Image (spheres, grey):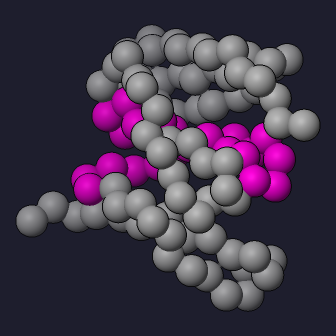
Amino acid sequence: MGMGGYLVSSNDGGKTWKSINVLIDNMHIFDFLMLDEKTAYAVGSEGLILYTDVAGQNWTPEASTTGQQLNKIRLVGNRIYVCGQGGTFLYKDIDLPK
């Protein structure tokens, strides 16, 4: 049995925390990108890319073209850039939240 992780959220500035609906077996998250109060991306080990548009209450895996560890995620204009181990560099154009 491997170690797993859970994402948690807080809607009171971190006074209380609630486990949310995603189990990440043997995965680690290394960076987050918040686009607004409801929309975010997370990246991590083994090419993990997660997306939420409901303030973190649920996270959906995004298609990833790599199994490399993803370390950083940034937004420039309407393009998200992700970089990771082994020279991994991914990008995706998005519609920004209104």
Asked if the magenta segment contains residue 65, the reply would be: no
Which residue is most to the bottom? Answer: 15
- Can residue 69 be seen at all in this image of the molecule? no
Q: Position of residue 79 (x, y in %)?
A: 73, 17
The image quarter containing residue 45 is top left
Q: Which residues are magenta?
A: 25-49
Q: Is residue 84 left or right of residue 57?
A: left
- Can residue 97 be seen at all in this image of the molecule? yes
Q: Quadrant of the N terminus?
A: bottom left
The image quarter containing residue 8 is bottom right
Q: Is residue 62 left or right of residue 39?
A: left
Q: Decide which of 97, 7 is in the foreground and name it.
A: 97
Q: Position of residue 69 (x, y in %)?
A: 38, 31
Q: Is residue 9 left or right of residue 88?
A: right
Q: Decide which of 31, 93 is in the foreground and name it.
A: 93
Asked if the magenta segment contains residue 42, the reply would be: yes
Q: Decide which of 79, 67 is in the foreground and name it.
A: 79
